[in-house]
Image (cartoon, rainbow, N blue to C red):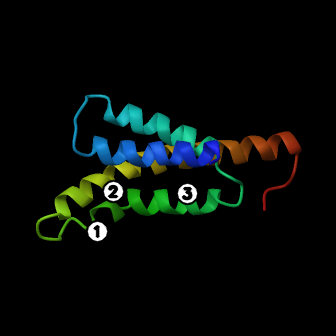
Amino acid sequence: MSIARIVWLVSAIAAVALAFVDSGYNGTILAVLGLLSGWFLDSDHRRGVIIAGAFLFAGGHTALSGIEGIGEHLGDILAALTAVFGGASVMAIVRTLVERIMKGSPAT
């Protein structure tokens, strides 16, 4: 198993766990895990993660909240995943920018 898969797995598990536990540092933990996850993204996966992060930020994390019984918990989990995908998106954008500046290639 690659380190990228391990980091994404740890991020997903932390998002699920922290959706139910309030440590006071949930946002920080999930943002740092998101940044780490974004660092290990392949260049062909960056666009998908950015789109997923934008969808979740735009309200996608509330899509399952209306389900009776478990909807609130699913919404909390997706809200925690939003923080992970947000951090990963920021790192993907910064890495792409730095790679383009260092290589001197035009934006496509």
Q: Residue furthest top?
A: 24
State the image quarter where residue 43 is shown: bottom right
Mark 1 or 2: in front is 2
Give above or below for 62 relative to 39: below
- N-terminal of the pair, mark 3 or mark 2, is 3
Decide if residue 59 is in sight here: no
Q: Alpha carbon of mark 1 to alpha carbon of mark 2: how far? A: 9 Å
Secondary element at image label 2: helix
Q: How many other residues sit within 10 Å of disc 1, few (<14), some (14-19) or many (≥20)? A: few
Secondary element at image label 3: helix
Tag shown at residue 2: none
Q: Alpha carbon of mark 3 to alpha carbon of mark 2: how far? A: 15 Å
Q: How many other residues sit within 10 Å of disc 3, few (<14), some (14-19) or many (≥20)? A: many
Identify the residue shown where x is 17% and y is 69%.
Answer: 66
Tag shown at residue 63: 1
Q: Position of residue 58 (x, y in %)?
A: 38, 61
Identify the residue shown where x is 36% and y is 46%.
Answer: 15
- N-terminal of the pair, mark 1 or mark 2, is 1
Q: For the C terminus, give its image quadrant.
A: bottom right
State the image quarter where residue 25 is shown: top left
Disc 2 marks which residue? 78
- Which amino acid lies under the numbered mark 2 shown in the image of this protein? Leu
Q: Residue furthest right?
A: 104
Disc 3 marks which residue? 50
Q: Position of residue 93 (x, y in %)?
A: 63, 48
Q: Position of residue 48 (x, y in %)?
A: 58, 63
Identify the residue shown where x is 44% and y is 38%.
Answer: 31
Q: Position of residue 59 (x, y in %)?
A: 33, 62
- Which amino acid lies under the numbered mark 3 shown in the image of this protein? Ile
Q: Alpha carbon of mark 1 to alpha carbon of mark 3: how far? A: 18 Å
- N-terminal of the pair, mark 1 or mark 3, is 3
